[in-house]
Amino acid sequence: MKDGRRPVGRPRKVSKSNTLVEIEILKASLGTSRKSVQYLLKSLGVPLFYIGKSTYFNLITLDKVLYYLSRPGGPGFSAPGSAHKKKYPRGDSTPIQITSSDRESIASIEFLREWAASSTGRPRIPNLRRTLQETLK
């Protein structure tokens, strides 16, 4: 771009195994506001990185959390502002944010082995990235 900024949605490779993705991609994919996406990522325990005027998240971290929540026997998730959360304001068994015990489970060797060995483990990352980027076209 003429102003020196990267095009929206272009990932930043920060190391061999870490790629940061602008939240604008997730915003376009979900069809919601930037603030809602930031709140969702915070509720999921995905750290945000503020670089220049852009905000980024680690796609692999998001993928691990989503896998943890959606795998068989997983707890599921009630996103901020969702109809489910409005229907059950006092809550039910569906979590509304990641707890410290969830973080410990996600960081455990057993979970990481399961995630890596899953049929959609590592190859899922490029597919997720491609899906998010297609929403900008």
Image (cartoon, rainbow, N blue to C red):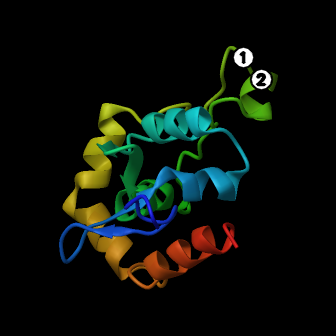
- Where is residue 135? Give x, y as percent: 69, 68
- The reply, left or right, for residue 57 in relation to residue 17 is right
> Which kind of residue does numbered mark 2 sit on?
Lys
**Whether residue 21 is situated above or below residue 38 in the rendered picture:** below
- Where is residue 55? Give x, y as percent: 41, 46
**Whether residue 36 is situated above or below residue 11 in the rendered picture:** above
> Which kind of residue does numbered mark 1 sit on?
Pro
Residue at (42, 78) in percent of width and height = 121
- Where is residue 22? Give x, y as percent: 45, 56
Please give the residue where the numbered disc 1 appears in the rendered image: 89
Q: Quadrant of residue 29?
A: bottom right
Residue at (42, 58) in percent of width and height = 3
- The reply, left or right, for residue 33 in relation to residue 104 is right
Residue at (54, 80) in percent of width and height = 127
> How crowded is the residue under tag 1: few (<14 C-alpha within 10 Å), some, or many (20+)?
few
Label drawn at residue 86? 2
**Dots 1 and 2: beta carbons under 8 Å?**
yes
> How crowded is the residue under tag 2: few (<14 C-alpha within 10 Å), some, or many (20+)?
few
- Where is residue 92? Give x, y as percent: 66, 26
**SS class of the residue under badge 2?**
helix
Residue at (26, 64) in percent of width and height = 110
- Does the rendering let one see residue 94? no
**SS class of the residue under badge 1?**
loop
- The reply, left or right, for residue 40 in relation to residue 115 is right
